[in-house]
Every structure is written in C-alpha cells, then in structure tokens.
Image (cartoon, coloured by chain):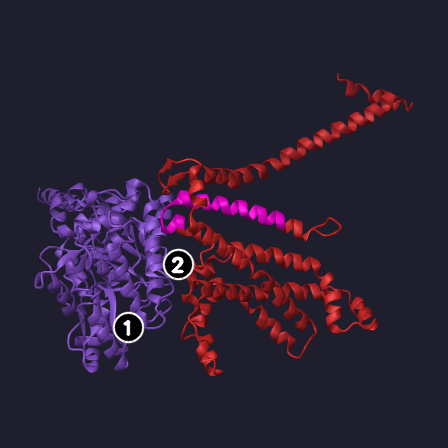
Amino acid sequence: MSLTEAEPAGAVSGVPRRGNTRWRATGRSRLAARRRRAGILLSLPAVVMVVALLGVPVGQAVYYSMTTWNGISSTWIGPSTYSTALTDPIFWRVLENNGLLLLAIPFAIGIPLGIAALLNEHVRGWRFFRSVYFLPTAVSWVVIGMVATQFFALNGLMNKMLSAVGLASLRTDMLAGQRSALIALAITFVWSMLGTNTIIFLTGMATLDPTLLEAARVDGLNRRQIFFRVTLPLLKRFVQFSFVITVISAFSALFSLIFVMTSGGPGFGTTTLEFFIYQSAFSNGAFGTGALYGIILFVIMIVVGLVQLRLIRSEDGEGW
Amino acid sequence: MAAAAALVAGLTAACGSSSGGGGASSGPVTLTIWHNYGTEQNATALANMAKAFHKLHPNITVNVVSQPATNYFAQLQAAAISKTGPDLAVMWTGLFTLQYKDFLVNLKGKVPAADLARVDPNALKWTSDGFNAANGPYVIPLENQFYIGFYNKAAFQRAGVTAVPTDWSQLFADCRKLRAAGFTPITYGNGGQPLGAEFYPWYDLSYMMIGSYSVSQWLGLYSGRIPWTSATNAAQLAQWSQMKRAGCTNSDVLTNTNNLGQFETGKAAMMIDGTWDTQKFTQALGSKVAAFVPPFSAAPINGVVDFAGDGLSEMTYAKHPAEATEFLKFMTTSQAASIINAAGLIPAIEGTTTSNPVNQEMLNFVSQNHMAVYPMLDNVVQPNVVSTGSKFLPSVLNGSISAKQALQNLQTTLTQLPASNRGSSY
C-alpha cells in the first residue's frame, strides 16, 4: 500500500493534523496528475493529426527547399539555395509587389466602413444598396477577375466612360503597364473585399447600444463627431476582425485574381509571393524552389501574424 | 471435327488479333487521354482519332479530356507525382519532352520499329534523348506544325501592297499603307494559343532568331555561347519593339483577346500564328488567306519553322499500358494521317500530305523555295528561359520595357540554371 493510500485513515478521524493537509494536497496533485494524463491522452489524436498533416509536410518542405526537386526525383544542394533566392532581384521585386498591395488595405477597410455608416443611417433604398454592396461576396474571385479584365481593357468600360465624359486623353490600357496593372489589381481587390467588410461593419453597428448614440446627440455632437468619437471606438473589435481577414486575403487569396487578370505580368509586375510559388513549382517544374519560397512565405506570415496580434491587442490585454 | 477446326480457327484468329493488339486486353477498357488543345483543330483531330480507334477496338473506349492550356503541364506533373493522371497525354516536343521524361515511357521497343519508321524522322528526333531518334522517342507526333504568318490578300490589294514584306523596312512601309487603308496591319493578342493572359511571343522570336542565325547556331542560345544580350539579338528586338509605335499592331497588344476574330473578319491584315489555326482561317476567309514568312529580319529570311511541336506520350504509370501503346501505334497509320489531314493539319507520317492549300503553301516554302527548316525556338531553349521570355517579351512589343531589359532577364535566367542544363549539347 502506498503512502497516499494510507493517509485517508487519518483524515477520517477528523483531527486536523499536518498529515491531513498533506493528504489533501497530495490528493489534489494526484487528481491534477490524472487530469493532466487524461488531457494528454485526449489531445493526443489532435496532436498526432497536426504533426502528421502540418508538421511533417512543413518539415518535408524545409528539406525539399534545399534540393533541386522536380516533383519526382531530388538532388541535395543545401542551405545555399536560400542565399541564392535572397540575392535574386526577381524575388525582391515580387516581395515589393506584396508590400505595395498592402497599401490597398486601408482602402479595403475604410471604404466599406464609410458605406456601412451611410447604410446604417437608413438612407432611402438602403436595403437595395446593402444587397448591391454585398454582391462581390457572392461572386467567385475568378468571375470578378474576368469582369475586371474587361473593365480595365483598352476598349473596356472604364475607358469608354472616360471618353464619354470628355476625358479620352486619359484612356489607358491599365493591365499593360507593370505599375498600372498592380493598381488595377489593387482596385479589384478592394472591390472584392467590399461586401464582406461592409457586412461586418453593418453587423457591428447593429449591435451598438442606441442610447449611447442618443446621449451623444443630446450632448450636442454632430454626425461626424458621433461617428469618430462614439461609433468608431465601439466598432474596434469589428475593425480588428476586418483587418485580420483583409490582410490574410491580401497575402493568400489574390491568386485567382492574378491568374485570371494578368498571369503575374506584365513581366513580374503583378506577381506576388504566392503566385511566384505556383509559377516556380508548376510552370517551371522546380518544386524545390517552390518549396523554398513557400517556407519564406510561411515565415513572413508568422511575422505578419505576430505584428497583427501586437497591433490589435486591446488595452485590457484581450485581442481579437 | 469441323466444329473443332472452327473453334481452333476462331481461337487462332483471336490470338492473332490479340498479338496484333500488342497484348491489349480483350475486356472492356477505358483509355484516358489529356490534351491542352482547347478548341483548336488538333482537338478535332484527336477526338476523331479516338472515334476511329474505338471502331477498330470496340472494347477500348477512349476518354478524351480537355485540360486548361494555361496550367496544363503543371497538372500533368502533379498528376504524375500522385499517379492519378491519364494513360496518354499531349506532350510538347523538344526540351519540354526531356523536362518531363521522368514520367514518360520511352517507346523504343514498345512501338515496333516498322511503325516508327512511318513517322517523319525529323519529327521523331526532337522527341528523343539527345535529339537523336536512335535513343527512342517519348512522343508520337500528331502533326508537323509551322509557326507562320497569315495574311489577307484582299486587304493587301485594297491597301496597294503588291507583295508580302520580306524584311523590316518593307514591313514598316506596308504597315503604313495598310493603316491608311483602315486595317490593323498585324493583330496581336492571346487568342492564337491561349497559354496565358498575354500573347505568346515565341512565334515572333523564332523568326527574329532565324533572321540572325543558322539552325546549328541556335545551340549557342541554349549553351550561352551566344548571349541573349548580344548586339544581334538586341538589334532584332529593338526593331520588333518599333512595330507598335510605327502603327503595325493593334494598340492593346497585351490585353487583346480577340485577335483571331479580328483577322477572320478582315479587320486585321496579318497575324503571326501556327498551322493549328489554318483551317479556321481558310473557312472564314476562303481563298483570301495565304501564308507568308514573318519578315523579322534586316535581310530576307530564308528559313521557316517546320516542326512536329506536339504529340502523345504514354505515362509510366498508365493503368492500361498495352492499350495506350496500341493507340500510339494507330497514330502512325495512314488512317490516322487521313484524320489529321481532314482536320486541316499536316500529318507527320511519311508519304502523306495536306489537302489544305494554305498548309501546302507552307510546305512549298521548304520543298520549292528551299528554305531551311528550323525547330520552334521555345522547344529548344530551356523551359525556364521560355517562361521568362513569355513574361517579358510581350512588354517589349508594348513598349513598356526596353529590349535590353528583356534580354537581360533572359540572360539572367539562363545563367542561374545549373551548368548541366546549358551544356554544349541538348
């Protein structure tokens, strides 16, 4: 019989002793140990799944990133593949594109916020406009890309509209220039995020306590002041959420837009890192190089995630 | 006794049929073929061959699957890794074949030598290791293809252009006349071969390089002995980049998706394309359409791209290898050649020819005008270089980047390749 099993006898006597306290402490620790073991056992399948489905592939990707792997056979090169990639000017050009696309994020959040504020005022036909603004969310990114291609074409709607208002001199083939194509892509991205973000903000505004807004009005604040001093601070969590999904989309959901609109061109003008991974691996058949850029994107996303967490952490220590 | 004899005879006939089928199963089999032809004439030819093959082998159903052209090779490679692809697949020849040969069956010894002997030897060699047919082909070519210029004779006549241009200066002069007559002289766009969002620049570059080098010298572009940045290449590309500015092209060369339509409706006078669209043009324009050698050179060009650019390969992981080989053997027959010809293509089978007059004009460039036969440039330079060229060269024609910049990118891509990928032989 073990010591812990003998102890309860003393406890039954009801005499408070140091031993009794020790029993309670030991009992608790035994319970905690059991719980810990059960916890480990219960979480084991999930851990095994994560390791098998994430850990192993990530490990394999790290290995293959240091090889010339064509998908079937591989030759070990070593970590020098990373220095080669990092000194490739095309890689930095691609990263620059990612960075420039991030500049679209304030617009992808700000414009829907403004639209949501207007719709929340229940202007005439607001229900109709709510459906119209939500439309991009219901449309596939591929369709959005195809429509955008036609819109920005030299003989497309945008240029026709410019001609119609006497600004024919501004007609331009936006998708034909490296920088202008990136701008067209950014505009399309902002439009495609419009519905999702508008609905997020509208939902947020619907949850606000109307008495607070009423109180602000009674205190003499005008609409603009109410929006910036009351509504916006109360929408903080929704803005944080919108920020997170927009950043993630900017990094990882633009593939289909780029594929349809520009194929990453002209040159590398609209090639983002995720598209570069696809091109390296699948267009050039260099799966090792694709894995290498995949690892770099993985690291970048970790850094971006940490920065996001830092930025959106609430003053009370709670982040979204 | 008679019944026994009949049974033996029947069994013998069945065995004969079976051996003729190269060990193909007599039970029902579905053979899968992938292609990236879209709606081009090659797709028609392949579908009709599948039907004819099924008639000959009623137990073999051929499932022809059209895959998107833009990422066709990516899909094929991914399918090869997971061994979930087709039995047979369309494969481009030259270095494309060698790039993917890990999952392609070498047909030496599989397809009988007598069958292979019926295929144009010049076509077979570009599908074999070291570009030597003796090493065994990985692809049975579907057709002989030309990268070529097409022009509208009626448009030329209306513009007062009496002969096709044969060099840069004549081209620019003719562009002015055609433009004045209300035509787009040459239309560019991604409709010719939908491989990406922009037009495919390797038809043009092939002719620029034909204008600069002999066939054997092209190896220098592969090995790096002739740098992409050489003065000759830069001069050729600089001339080419003038075309848009000189009014030779449509203004939306990078984003136009209707170049085929513009040529077929007579709005554009010329187009640089390939034999896979010949029938489309002859159907739309009748006798008004003719072939010409793109005049991308300071002096008249004396070469033409005549190359079996594609065909079918058997996958190493094919579920029905015997039936797949049987189909490849069928491709070498005169019956298959007739089907290919009927689709408006030029069969790569010895002793056969084309009935399309415009295709015949192309063959005449070689047989009557004695022009040198060149491969497709993009099939004999490294795929990575092709990929980079496809990204940058269209922007040169558009005037967005300089010829020098584009060539520098090609050269950088080449020098980043391992030395083994840019040796003194293919």
Q: Is residue A17 visible?
A: yes
- Res. B255 image quadrant: bottom left
- Residue indicated by mark 2: A267
Return the x and y of residue B107 as percentages of the image width and height.
Answer: 20, 44
Q: How many C-alpha atoms fall within 10 Å of the one at disc 1: few (<14), some, or many (≥20)?
A: many
Q: Chain A appears what colour?
A: red
Residue A227 lies left or right of residue B101; in this view the side is right
Residue depicted at 18% across the width and 41% down the height: B135
Q: Amino acid at mark 2?
A: Gly
Q: CA distance from mark 1 to mark 2?
A: 22 Å
Return the x and y of residue A258 as percentages of the image width and height.
Answer: 45, 60
Residue depicted at 28% across the width and 61% down the height: B237
The magenta region covers A280-307
Residue at the farthest front position: B231
- Please tell me whether residue B386 is drawn above or below residue B301 in the rendered image: above
- Residue indicated by mark 1: B248
Residue contact at pointers 1 and 2, CB within 8 angstroms = no
Please name the predominant secondary structure of the magenta segment in the image.
Answer: helix
- Secondary structure beneath dot 1 equals loop
Using the image as rendered, state which of residue B324 and residue B351 is in the foreground: B351
Residue B327 lies left or right of residue A295; in this view the side is left
Return the x and y of residue B318 as percentages of the image width and height.
Answer: 29, 45
Q: Is residue B190 visible?
A: no
Residue at the farthest right position: A15
Chain for colour purple: B
Residue A294 on the magenta segment: yes
